[in-house]
Image (cartoon, rainbow, N blue to C red):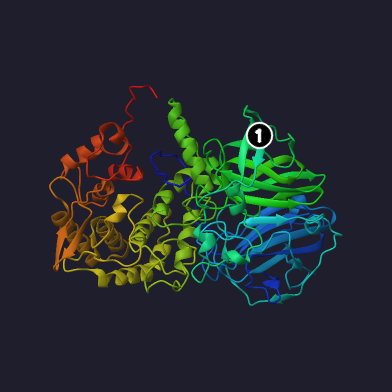
Amino acid sequence: MRIGLLSTLVLLCSVVPNVASYQAGFRSGKPIWPMGMQKEKNLTVGFRVVFDAPTAKRVILRVTASIVYRAFLNGSFWGYGPARGPHDHFRVDEYDLTDDLRSGKNLVAIEVAGYNVNSYYLLDQPAFLQAEVLSGDDVLASTAGTGARFEAGILRERVQKVQRYSFQRPFSEVYRLRPGYDRWRKEIAAQFETVECSVFPDKKLLPRRVPYPNFHLRYPLTHILQGTVETGIKVEHLWNDRSLTGIGPPLGGFAEGELEVIPSIELQKVGTVPDDERKRPFSPEEKLQFTKNSYHLVDFGTNLTGFLGAKITSRNGARLFLTFDEILSNGDVDFKRLSCVNIVSYEIPPGTFVVESFEPYTLRYLKLAVLDGDCEIEKISLREYANPEVEKAHFAASDERLNRIFAAGRETFRQNAVDIFTDCPSRERVGWLCDTFFTSRVAPDLSGNTRVEENFLENFLLPERFAHLPEGMLPMCYPADHNDGVYIPNWVLWFVIQLEEYGARSGDWQMVEAFRPKVMRLFDYFRPFKNEDGLLEKLDSWVFVEWSEANRFVQDVNYSTNMLYAAALAAAGRMYGNSAFLAEANRIREAIRGQSFDGNFFVDNSVRKAGKLEATRNRSEVCQYFAFYFDIASPETYSDLRRVLRDRFGPQRERSGGIPGNPRSQCIHWQYAAFGDPFPVRPDPAGS
């Protein structure tokens, strides 16, 4: 579900003012973690406190953590967080517990995962929890402060030495449950094996700012099929992702030889044979029966993002695997299709267990397979993790196709705008530059505010520098760790353009001004790469245009990148009143027109031969869109090219055949961006 939304539908939504900076801090709670374990990989720790609830008074739970937590009140799920912040800064959540408190004693339990590995999704920072329960000025409970004290215990049911979920995300989930594994968070009198905690210095705190998800429970709508499982299938070439085989200094995790189990290998040797392929409606109360080597496949009706849950009862114990994907591949779930481990597995003793995944996943189809033992599964669910504010936006048209497009766009946005803008809510959950330029444009239309974008930009603003990157360079995605030193030099130019648009749509020019030093240092970074014509040449690291043939044409002088460079210079010139930047942008545009246009198309690149630049014959579709979008070309000055793009490329390419020698663009949104509005939908003669 890679996001590529454009704000082509204008909705009447007001923009709310930005929320002020977080001022409250913690009155008593201190950051704590089991002693000597703050940097241990994939350690899950439970914290709990019992406190007396005051009568008729408001009670607040204030909490932050590194790196992820979920909270419970008297055994009921309460929240998940925190919203992501930059390195050495932590966003604070506040929950009003008042209406759900019991008279007398109450139990708050918080489960925290300290991953301590680098990723594009969650930062590699030492683990801690900081929490307190407040009633007015009274501290009812806290971590290492006044009031009742939070106790800590290691939660061993989540297996520690497991493979990563993907290159971009930390660990996958494997569980070995024991009877009563969750009593610590449900029962006030539960026995809890505690460990001593260290107390750490105060942290730099930030407001959450973005709304809390509603955490609605969604249920499968359709039972697709059921059948038997065949094990021991021989596989000639096993899928071994780099997240399994490439563990080392650049990529944190447990080496393959250290892993206790490797579900991704085991399940590649498993096949399924359907016994009953009749689709039927599925009820949330339905109970699915499993014997050894059996499975069921259910459909949630649409792609959703959240936490997978179920109630499992087993007489003899079972090994259960949940595999999932956004589509069916040959009628089945392919857990590895997106180069990630879409598996949550459970080893279950006899008894009844209510389970829910700790991490959010994206899926439409869920396959439940039992390879050993037997069990009965009911209350299969997905607890949504999505932006709740899109419900403010409404659209209706007489053409039902437009209504479906709007609904799909809104659904995509809500799953990709929880705390920052992400490119996908599944494999990566990453805040990529460029992607966010387009997503941020639609945010006010769908949610009525720019809060998520403010968080996203603030994360880039606050760090003094970014480890492993050259001076002045910004990360290609963030919050993320880039231990391998890879960055996309042209991607950060999208950041400058987005920053100008953010100021215009939010009115937050204070944020724009705060970025002035970073923007200036960014252009200082590019200065050594400017050639005699003022164009960027032989940029370092990963020069990226889009996932198409255009990425093969990025050296020595890539004209798409220089078109973007001119636009970024112009944006900085307007933001900061820098006339030199504006003049330089115009000179670059003139140089591109003179070197890149071959009379019919703009070529992608020139290469230096014998000291001179020589234009190639590489003419990608996306390069033409860049030319129009970044003011190199206009409909008046390049009318013939515009007509070719309109009639032979984009949506018409399949019908027209395009132009030989012009590799297609991967993303149609470039064409929409270049020409302002979607081109008219032409009726299909076949009526499809």
The amino acid pointed to by label 1 is: Gln
Percent position (x, y) of residue 381? 67, 42
Percent position (x, y) of residue 291? 75, 40
Mark 1 surroundings: few (<14), some (14-19) or many (≥20) residues within 10 A: many
Q: Quadrant of residue 496?
A: bottom left
* Residue 219 in view, yes or no: no
**Closer to the camera in the image, 130 or 575:** 130
437 sits to left or right of 583: right
**Closer to the camera in the image, 299 or 586:** 299
Percent position (x, y) of residue 555? 25, 61
293 sits to left or right of 340: right
Q: Is residue 337 above or below residue 178?
A: above
Q: Residue at x 79, y 45 (%)?
A: 314
Q: Badge 1 is on which residue?
A: 226
Q: Residue at x 31, y 34 (%)?
A: 654
503 sits to left or right of 193: left
Disc 1 is placed on an element classified as strand
Numbered label tally: 1
**Closer to the camera in the image, 42 or 389:** 42
Q: Residue at x 55, y 57 (%)?
A: 209
Percent position (x, y) of residue 186? 80, 55
**Closer to the camera in the image, 67 or 91:** 67
* Residue 109 in view, yes or no: yes
73 sits to left or right of 210: right
Q: Is residue 669 above or below residue 239?
A: above
